[in-house]
Structures are given as structure tokens and as C-alpha cells.
Image (spheres, helix red, strand yellow):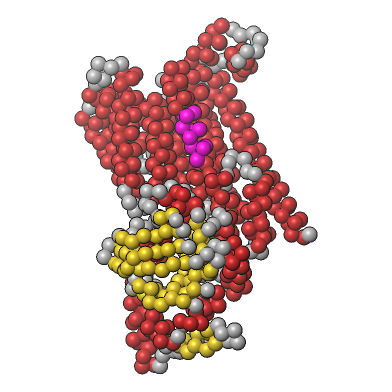
Amino acid sequence: MQSSGLLSDAISNQRRSEQRRWFVISILSVVLLTSFILDVATGPSLLNVKDVANALLHLIGFNTEVDPTTKVIVTNLRLPIAIMAVIVGGVLGVGGAEMQTLLNNPMASPYTLGMAAAAGFGAALTLYVGSLGLNANVAVPLGAFICCMLAAAFLFALATMRHISSGQLILAGIALLFLFQSLLSLVQFISSPELSQQILFWLFGSLSKASWSNLAIVGSITFVCMVFLMRDAWQLTALRLGEERAKSLGVNVSRLRLKTLFIVALMTATVTSFVGIIGFIGIVAPNIAKILVGEDQRFFLPLSFLIGAFLLSSASVLSKVIVPGALFPIGIVTAIIGVPFFFWLILGKRR
Amino acid sequence: MLQVNNLNVSLDTLILAKNMSFSLQPGKVNVIIGPNGTGKSTLLKTLFGDIQAKSGDISFFDETLHPKQLSHWRKQFGYMPQDIRLDVELSVLEVVLLGQLDALSLRLDDSLIEQALSALETIGLLHLANRSVNKLSGGQCQMILFAQALMRNPKILMLDEPVSALDLHFQHVLLDHLDQQTKQQGWVTLMVLHDLNLAAQYADNLLVLKEGHVVESGHPSDILTPQLVEQVYGVKAEISKDSQGIPFVRTIRQGKQAQPLSAESQQHTSSNSSKGVERAL
């Protein structure tokens, strides 16, 4: 009798803890939505929130009154940037989450493993060498994408080797980071001041190049990648118990590692090539998600996306309001808003 | 029947199995004993297909282990590796559920949860179900991992030092349950133990490993002798038998003069073992 009571208690506790985690996810979605609307509402032309909300409602089919200029600004300029911020932030969060899962290390992220630095080098090199007949708006992201995938391919090749440990992979990634940073400095050093300036701006990261066509590419790649990752959610959770244990549970560890590494590389390379280097989110978002919902990837993965998205979206808002009328590079702002929040969480957890 | 024929396994230059052959019957508890670094864990990993043998074959009834077709082979195993650290932000229930990895989907079935909870209940740890595993003690983790292995509904159950962190009570909870289930479900159970008395109490079949050979195998009451203990471990022992004929091993401390020698030999074996672990990784 008593044990059957315990049994049903344990089931309802489990269900309650699942509900709690869904609740956290929905709260974060609302927070993200708020910051998204603020992101659309802020900018050099200082529209007010109500008009923007009306324009958004009009867009999704409601019959609200909208001033045509507001409508054009919202649909063609603000909306792509705001959506891009959400997707890019989300991808950075998820990329970090999966790197941390694969490498069993809370300090891993595509950034710390040199993939972002490789993209930066690729972009700088393309700017330096010239776009070889291609439109610069295509050539620079393409150069960044190729270099980023090359760095990933190198990590990939290492990961396929037998008996390589996560620690060794991380070290190799950090070595790549330094290598590409040096190469990047080299390109900056030998290029003209104007070019150097251009490179620097690319490196800061910027959402301003977002357009509906970029968004279509980034959005669809992200969507497909997320579906694949979610399908492996339980396998990835099992991997967190350690590689040997995951194997003992029937996970094909080397295949899972390669598949996930490829997906993360593809997502990261895509977003980085369009918006430049935005560090930090990849490390912070998953750690916050871990504190909030634990490491069951069914919750951890989507929440890492949402938190990453929120961090970048709110950074985008801040980058516009710090100095009204001017646009602060978003890569700088993310760390400034993220770090205090992160410290607060780490220290809160300590108690 | 799990059958091993002429198995040869080596890691780098270390030979861990040399023309090893044995067979394990369903419904029997098989226990491997032997000195550190002698290849006990490696043998389990080889049976699991994680380490590839140089030669020889391993078969379970009419299926032969083939390195290219591991996934079906491994489905039949519950395997509890030696490492018991669980440094992860998951609940006990979630960790146990992972034993049924292939059955898990985005929404968890009530029936799976019940199965996991009853696995916990049989080992007396139902009250921990909703706790986070990284707040548990080493011994509790070990019991949770045992529940996880049970959750796999194995045909072959391999446990690498399953009681290394357990107190007296849980040693017996685990081994009693294991013994009972092995007989009831007809599992082929194979575990590594260091405690000769536990091995003597629970083994239906004892495999004594040394330097890549099975030096002796059979029922503990038939094979466990002071000569064997001295030959395998270099330790003098007295062996008495209780009323049911189960051997009891009592080691004899060496005299003062012999001590430096034994300390040295111990150091020697422990350095061997750490090398073994490193290579196994």
C-alpha cells in the first residue's frame, strides 16, 4: 500500500517537474516576444511601440490602421533585423549547448573552438583578396562560411580518430582559435587602414545586413538542423552520462558525435557568415538553460535556443538605445548585458 | 550461452587475453576475479564489442559478434561500467529511464516511468526518484546505475565491480537481487568482483584470470584453495567452509620481514593497473 502511494507520488512529481520546465520555456518565450517587439519598435526613426504593434498585427492579418511609412519601415527594415537577431541568437545558444554536450565541458562553444575565428579570417581574407567577380555581399559571407567549415572539418577529422578524448578535442579547438586569430591579425596588419576598418566592422558583428532573402536561407537551415537535433534529444542526454556509459546504453557515440558536430558547424557557419562574430552567447545561454531546466535535452535544447535568442534580441534593443540615433556594434553589447546576468546566476546557484 | 573461443586481446604491447576460451550458461552468476591490470574490464569491453579482439570469436547462441554489426549485439546487453560518477543535471528517474533509450520519445509514456520506478523500488531507492543525481553519494549513484542496467531488460548482464562503492547492506541488496533475477529471467550474468568472499557467496561459476589466461574456473567451493589465492595474488590465506560448503577466505598478514617485499609487490601491481586503465581508455 505504502509503496504504491510512493510510486504514484513519484510519477506525479515527475510530471510536475516536466510541467515546471514547460512553464519556464513559455515564460522565456513571452520574454523573448517582448524583446522582439521592442527590437522592432526601436531604431533611428523613433516610431512608437503602439504603431509598431499595429503594423505587426496588420502583417499577420488583423485589420488595424497603419501609416504606410511605418509599414515600410517595419516590414522591410526592422522586421528582418529583429527576426535575424532571434534566429542568430538561438543558433549560437544551441551551438554552444551541443558543443558542451559533445565535449562534456561547460566552456566549449563554437566560438572557443575557433570556428568563429575561422569565419572571421575567411571574411577578412575575402575583403583583402577581393571578391573575384562575385558581389561582395555574397563573396564575404561565402568566404566566412568556407573557412568556418574548414575549421569544423579539421575538428571533424580529429573526432573520427580512435580513442581521442574530449579534452584533446577542446585543446585542438583552442589551438585553432589562436591560429585563426593570428592569421586574422596578419591580414589586418598587411591591409590598408580603410580595409582594416572594414574588417573590424565585420568582426564586431552586425545584424544590419539582414534581408528577407538572407533570412530565408538562415531560417530554413536553422529549422532543419533543429529538427535533426531534437530527434536525437535522448541520445544527446545519454551522452552527458559519459561516453562509455552512453555506449553501454546503445548509443553509437562516434556517429552521434560526427552528426551533431556537422549540424552545429553548419548552423554556426551560416549565421556567422551573415552577421559576423558574436561571442559569449554560445557559452552563456546553455549554462543558464542548464540551471533553469537541467540537462534533459528535450527542455535544454529549446531553452538554450530561447535564451540565446533573448540575449541577442535584447542586445539589439540596447545597441540602439544606448546612444539614440547611433547603432552600437551588437557584438560588443551582448557581453556587456550578458555578463552581469550570468554572474548573478552563477553566484545564486552557489547558495 | 555466451561462448568465447581462442580469444586474443592486446592493447599496445600489453597482452590481456591469450587464447582464452570459456562459455557462460544462462541462469548462472559468473564472477571474474583476478589481480589489478590483468584485463578483467578489458574482457568485458571486448565482449561488449568496444574493444576489438586480435583474433578469436565471441558468440551468443547462434549470433556471432561482428565489429560492423554492433547495434543489435549490444541491444542484448545490460552493461554497467566501472565508472560511477554521474556529474549531470538530471533526476534519478531520468537516468534510470535512459536504460530504455530506444523507447524514449519527446513525451514520456506512463508505462516507462512506472517500469523505471519499479526498478528503483526493487532495490529500495524509490524515495530518491525525483532527486538530482549530482547530489547523490557514490554508492547511491552505483545503485542507480544498477537500476539503469536492469531497465534494459538484458539477456546478458555485465557488471564491472558493481559493489565497489556500496555499504554492506546495499552490497547484499544488489547481489541478492542480481542472483534472484539471473535465475528467474535466465540471464547470462558476468561480473567482476574483488572481494573473494562475496565472489564465493554469489558465484555459480568463478573465472580466475591472470596474465591473459583463465587459470581456473568452476564452482567456488571446488576451486577456491589457499594455493590458488597465493598463486594469483601472492597472498597467503586460510580457507574454511561454512555449513553449506561455501568457502570463507581469511588472508594472513605477512610477518615484519616479509612486509617490504609485499609493499613493493603491491606498488608494482598498482602501477600496472594504472597503466592498464590508461591504455583501456
Give how far across and how far down residue A259 sits, in percent: 41, 39
Does residue A307 appear in the picture of this structure?
no
Task: Determine the residue positioned at 63% across, 35% down.
Answer: A27
- In this view of the protein, can residue A214 be seen by the observer? yes
Q: Is residue A251 magenta?
A: no
Which residues lie in the magenta part? A222-232
Q: Picture quarter containing residue A327?
A: top left
Quadrant of the rendering where the C terminus of chain B is positioned: bottom left
Above or below, A65 relative to A33: above
Q: Residue at x 60, y 87 (%)?
A: B243
Please, what is the dominant secondary structure of the magenta stretch?
helix
Q: Residue at the right extreme?
A: A1
Residue nearer the viewer, A180 or A203: A180
Q: Which residue: 55% across, 36% down? A: A302
Q: Quadrant of residue A118?
A: top left
Can you name the residue that lies furthest to the left here? A190
